[in-house]
Amino acid sequence: MTKQSIVAVAALIALLVPVAALAHEGHPHRFMGTVSAVQDEQLEVKLTDGEIVTFTLNAETIYRQGKTKVVGKLPKAGERVVVSAMPVEEGKVMVAETVQLPVPATAAR
């Protein structure tokens, strides 16, 4: 590889790195874990990596069980959930856009 080729590859990488860093902005991120607390309008979830994340619940938060939208059902401590929320600045609380609740087990036939 010539010196000119190495410089060209390095320049290309330098131009593409900022684009890759921006690739995940502008869409909700998904957080999977177990509900550790539900208080007032906040949901606390212990993620699969052990980190605890707090989300604000509001009138726009959508709750689902499977593909079905449910109304008036909040998650309970110990339940596994998937929360979609837009990332925010460090120190701020994310607002949950959707909370995927566990699907109840079907009765044995």
Image (tube, grey):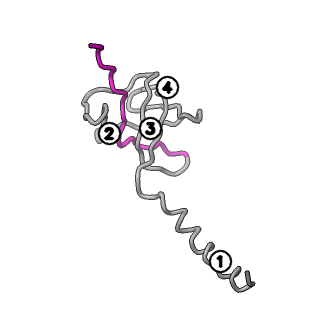
N-terminal of the two: label 3 or label 4?
4
Q: In the rendered image, which residue does mark 4 sit on?
A: 36
Tag 2: Cα neighbours inside 10 Å, few (<14), some, or many (≥20)?
A: some
In three-dimensional space, the C-alpha distance between marks 4 and 1, rounded to whole angstroms, equals 48 Å
Q: Where does label 1 land, which residue?
A: 9
The answer to which of marks 1 and 2 sits earlier in the sequence is 1
In percent of width and height, residue 96 lies at 39, 41
Q: Residues within 10 Å of mark 3 (few under 14, many from 20)?
A: many
Q: Quadrant of the C terminus?
A: top left
Looking at the image, the residue that sits furthest to the top is: 109
Task: Residue at 47%, 25% (x, y): give it.
Answer: 37
Dot in front, 4 or 1: 1
Q: Residue at x 49, y 25 (%)?
A: 36
- In the displayed structure, 25 sits above or below 58; it is below
SS for dot 3:
strand
Classify residue 6 as left or right of residue 60: right
Residue that label 3 marks: 55
Label 3 sits on what residue type?
Phe
Of the two numbered discs 1 and 3 on the same chain, state the one appearing first in sequence: 1
Identify the element where label 1 is drawn: helix
Task: Name which residue type carries label 1.
Answer: Val
Residue located farthest toward the bottom when viewing the structure as drawn: 4
Instruction: Tell me: residue 64, above or below residue 85.
Output: above
Disc 4, disc 1: CB below 8 Å?
no
Q: Quadrant of residue 4?
A: bottom right
Q: Position of residue 97 (x, y in %)?
A: 36, 43
What's the CA distance linking mark 3 and mark 4?
Answer: 12 Å
